[in-house]
Structure formats: structure tokens, C-alpha cells
Amino acid sequence: LAATPLWLLDDGAQAPQQQVLLNLGPQMPEDAQRHERVIELVGAAEPGLSAGRRRWRAYEQLGMTVRHHAREGSA
């Protein structure tokens, strides 16, 4: 089996070019458009929910396609 690299970076650090970026931080990655997909995990409580909405709008302003995937049992 081939190994899949996983990079853990501090805010402001630039990840190597990869197809998928998993953003766990509260800010939108500056280099989001370099990746084919950006995955965001957004909690249901404030202030994470508001931050997630701001990132959503910012991704849309960049022309990126944004899709919501609700967790099972939620709206």
C-alpha cells in the first residue's frame, strides 16, 4: 500500500500542493484555490458557526463551488 502524506501546519504556513485540504482552523486558508477540494468541519455552536458562514461566502466570492453535507440526523 502506498502511504498518503499528512501535513499538519500552523496558521499562515503553506501546505505543499495537494488535491485535498482539510481546514480545521477558524480562518480560510490563503491558498485555498491551489487545491481541488477544501473540506471544512463546522460545529453547530457559536462562534464556529458564524466563522463557517464567513468562510462559505469567501469561498463563493473566489468562484469556488461550495456544498453543504449535513451530518446524519441534522438539517
Image (tube, grey):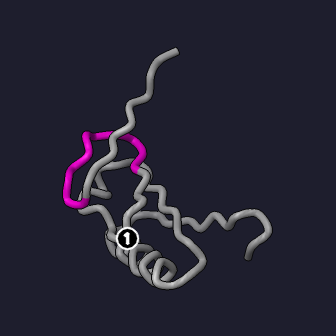
Residue ID for mark 1: 26
- Residue pushed farthest right? 73
Q: Quadrant of residue 30?
A: bottom left
Residue at 44% x, 22% y: name it.
3
Q: Residue furthest top?
A: 1
Closest to the observer, 18 or 46:
46
Residue 74 coordinates in the image, percent (x, y): 75, 73
* Amino acid type, label 1: Pro
- Main SS, magenta region, reads loop
Query: The C terminus lies in which quarter of the figure?
Result: bottom right
Question: Which region of the structure is painted magenta?
Answer: 11-21
| Residue 29 in the image: above or below residue 54 | above
Instruction: Please check the rendered image and state whether residue 5 is part of the magenta-colored stretch, yes or no.
Output: no
Please name the residue shown 28% across and 49% down the image: 9
Q: Label 1: few (<14), some or many (≥20) within 10 Å?
A: some
Report x, y in % for residue 54: 40, 80
Q: Please state the total of marks drawn on the protein image.
A: 1
Query: Going 47% across and 64% down the picture, which residue do you hit?
Result: 65
- The local secondary structure at tag 1 comes to loop
Residue lying at 70% horizontally and 64% vertically, measured from the top left: 71
In the displayed structure, 32 sits above or below 66; it is: above
